[in-house]
Image: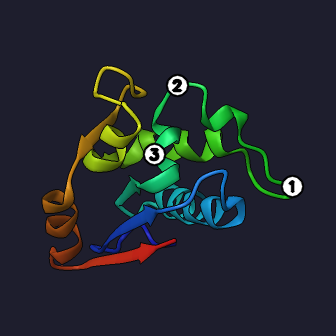
């Protein structure tokens, strides 16, 4: 349906278990777009940064929502997942701690991605 689109979707998740519906919405939109063939970049910031760690997404539950670990897997399989540098540092998370395929990067990379031609950014 959307596979021929040249646009990129950048989704920033700012919430984790502290705001489960907002968190699940960000992951659901990112995974849905990725499954439809849209290039996706999912940014984990604030409390969602914890989901860059192995096992954390598996422990997240929200009724009537797809499992967060499955949504994360879909995005990792076809797109990029980034944990915010400052958010990770505040939680003592470094590159050796995160799920394979997750990178840690800062605001300059976020700005570059969101300002690229054809990019659409959504923040949850």
Give the number of the disc on residue 92. none
The residues bearing labels 2 and 3 have C-alpha atoms spaced at a distance of 11 Å
Disc 3 element: helix
Sequence order check, earlier mark of 1 and 3:
3
The correct choice, above or below, for 110 with respect to 96 in the image is: below
Sequence order check, earlier mark of 2 and 1:
2
Q: Residue at x 39, y 28 (%)?
A: 98
State the residue in front, 72 or 86.
86
State the residue in front, 33 or 88.
88
Give the number of the disc on residue 54. 2
Give the quadrant of residue 69. top right
Give the number of the disc on residue 63. 1
- Is residue 81 visible in this depiction of the protein? no
Label 3 neighbour load within 10 Å: few <14, some 14-19, many 20+: many
Are the residues tagged 2 and 3 within 8 Å (C-beta)? no
Q: Residue at x 38, y 55 (%)?
A: 43
Q: Residue at x 80, y 53 (%)?
A: 62
Sequence order check, earlier mark of 2 and 3:
3
Q: Residue at x 26, y 40 (%)?
A: 104
The residues bearing labels 2 and 1 have C-alpha atoms spaced at a distance of 22 Å
The image shows residue 80 at horizontal and vertical percentages of 33, 47
The image shows residue 117 at horizontal and vertical percentages of 15, 79
Give the number of the disc on residue 49. 3
The correct choice, above or below, for 108 with respect to 86 in the image is: below
């Amino acid at each position: 349906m959307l596979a021929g689109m040249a646009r990129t979707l950048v989704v920033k998740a700012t919430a984790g278990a502290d705001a489960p519906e907002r968190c699940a919405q960000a992951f659901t939109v990112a995974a849905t777009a990725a499954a439809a063939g849209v290039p996706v970049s999912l940014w984990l910031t604030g409390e969602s940064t914890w989901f860059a760690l192995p096992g954390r997404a598996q422990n997240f539950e929200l009724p009537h929502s797809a499992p967060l670990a499955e949504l994360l897997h879909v995005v990792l399989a076809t797109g990029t997942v980034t944990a915010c540098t400052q958010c990770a540092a505040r939680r003592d998370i470094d590159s050796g701690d995160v799920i394979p395929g997750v990178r840690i990067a800062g605001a300059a990379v976020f700005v570059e991605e969101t300002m690229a031609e054809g990019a659409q950014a959504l923040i949850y």
